[in-house]
Amino acid sequence: VNPSDTAPALIALDASFVIKSGGAERVIPAEEFFVGPGTDITRLTVLGPSDLLTAIRIPATWAGKAHYFEKVRDRMVWDFALVNIAASIDTSGSSIAGARLVVNGVSAQPYRLTAVETAIQGKPRDKATADMAAELAVQGAAPLRHNAYKIPLVKALVKRAIRGEAEWTS
């Protein structure tokens, strides 16, 4: 399993990781489990040398809600995503009651779009909301020298997730 694919989905689903070290056990939210080079350049997770991941817990919070995952990559193999998105969206009638959107491939670790989640709450799941969310998702983005192409990719993925195109379950 490619961690660049599973990390955003686990964060979107509010999962937690059970880690054992010696006789001690701790539970870490998925959002805190994955780390970037600012924390430790040699690791992608909080796991230490004597830690063992024993379980992943996914609460029922998002059960029965709409979910969306899409991965953009160069080839049809086990490549890491150029950009991917995982979203869990709770609707009430035609409005968005709550959402969690997580992108990966745009920073050193999965990135939750909390400003987008807040902005779309109470809005209809339609093109106008999707367009607004896409612009907000990339606000302040500072691409590196050769990856500015990721900005339109993120915008497109956010729009599709909000509109619910090709949902993998609902």
Image (cartoon, rainbow, N blue to C red):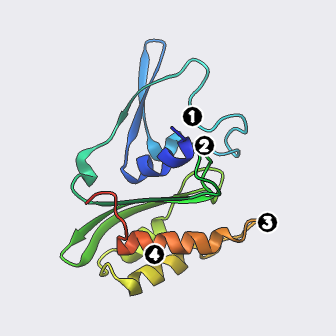
Q: Residue furthest front?
A: 76
Q: Residue at x 48, y 12 (%)?
A: 22
Dots 1 and 2: beta carbons under 8 Å?
Answer: yes
Q: CA distance from mark 4 to mark 2?
A: 27 Å
Residue 104's spot in the image, x, y percent?
56, 55
Quadrant where the C terminus is found in the figure: bottom left
Q: Nearer the viewer, mark 4 or mark 2?
A: 4
Dots 1 and 4: beta carbons under 8 Å?
Answer: no
Residue 115's spot in the image, x, y percent?
47, 70
Mark 4 vs 2, N-terminal side: 2
Mark 1 vs 3, N-terminal side: 1
Mark yes or no: residue 53 visible: yes
Camera-side residue of 21 and 170? 170
Kind of residue indicated by mark 1:
Val
Camera-side residue of 94 and 170? 170
Q: CA distance from mark 4 to mark 3?
A: 24 Å
Q: Which residue is mark 4?
A: 159
Q: Nearer the viewer, mark 1 or mark 4?
A: 4
Kind of residue indicated by mark 3:
His
Q: CA distance from mark 1 to mark 2?
A: 7 Å
Q: Residue at x 40, y 54 (%)?
A: 12
Secondary structure of the residue carrying numbered label 3: loop
Q: Which residue is mark 1?
A: 46
Mark 1 vs 2, N-terminal side: 2
Q: Which residue is mark 3?
A: 146
Task: Give the quadrant of residue 135.
Answer: bottom right
Kind of residue indicated by mark 2:
Val
Mark 1 vs 4, N-terminal side: 1
Taking 107 as reference, is 60 above or below it? above
Which numbered dot is residue 61? none
Q: Which residue is mark 2?
A: 35
